[in-house]
Image (cartoon, helix red, strand yellow):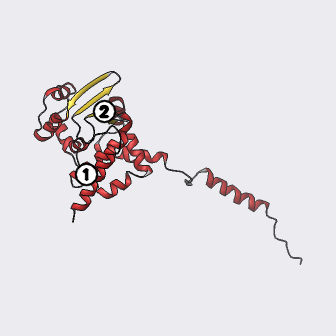
Amino acid sequence: MARPPKLLAVLLGLSLSAAAPGLPVHAAEQVVFVSGAFRRSIPVADLEHLAQTGEARGLLRDVLHFSRQDPASVSKLLNQQLSLPLVLTSRLLSTRIGEALLQRLAGIFAPLRAPQMGVQAIRGALITGLANGNGSLTATGFLQAYPAQELAVNIPALLGVIGKASSISDLVRFFSESPLDGLRGDGAVKPGSGDQSKTGSKTDSTSESSPAAPVPAP
């Protein structure tokens, strides 16, 4: 019974990726960290090796050593699962809120050769990755479903987000709530807003301008 929804989600993810020109359907092979003219690439295979064994190798080992990061902690982070319902997620990503969320993510992660396709690539990777993981997604699962060989990571944008969050839950909250800022208050009346004050002033002025009831003669 669970296979049809999963198959549908996989096909949906692949179609979203294939529908975007310049985005062939295959997994990411390199994660490219970019800051201006600076570029450094780390093979996805090395990230997968770290996730599976807890041991870093190659440039990734040097980066972790230089930044004083514990490989075991990074391995745990790579294996941390995010559980989301497939159908609900695919629907949410097609809403205004979903588009706003994807736009924010695409400002950090995008195909190196086609950055304008960042939104489509993330949407396809999320849906396909969740389908492959039976409703759960890890960092390596996302990379395996990403429809571009080179995934560029905007270092300044990433550091800006990290600076606003002290934990994974804070990051999730940042990405899920901040896109709502531009969608909230569209025609809605907030407590203490001008609309309420106008309503109150209108009521006051009406009561002041209304003539007093005549007093009956004795």
Name the kind of residue labelled 2 in the image: Val
Q: Residue at x 86, y 76 (%)?
A: 216
Q: Is residue 169 visible?
A: no
Q: Residue at x 32, y 43 (%)?
A: 122
Instruction: Tell me the CA gap for discs 2 and 1.
Output: 21 Å
**Rendered position, 10 above or below 62:** below
Residue 49 lies left or right of residue 211; in this view the side is: left
Identify the secondary structure beneath mark 1: helix
Between residue 134 and residue 149, name the one nearer to us.
149
Mark on residue 172?
none
**Rendered position, 200 above or below 109:** below
Q: What residue is disc 1 on?
A: 130
Q: Position of residue 72 (x, y in %)?
A: 14, 37
Identify the secondary structure beneath mark 2: strand
Residue 152 lies left or right of residue 1; in this view the side is: right
Residue 96 lies left or right of residue 159; in this view the side is: right
Q: Quadrant of the N terminus?
A: bottom left
Name the kind of residue labelled 1 in the image: Leu
Q: Residue furthest bottom?
A: 218
Residue 210 falls in image quadrant: bottom right
Q: Residue furthest top?
A: 37
Q: What residue is disc 2 on?
A: 153
Q: Residue at x 23, y 42 (%)?
A: 139
Q: Residues within 10 Å of mark 2 (few under 14, many from 20)?
A: many
Residue 200 lies left or right of residue 130; in this view the side is: right
Which circle's residue, 2 or 1, is located before the other in the chain? Answer: 1
Question: Badges 2 and 1: C-beta atoms under 8 Å apart?
Answer: no
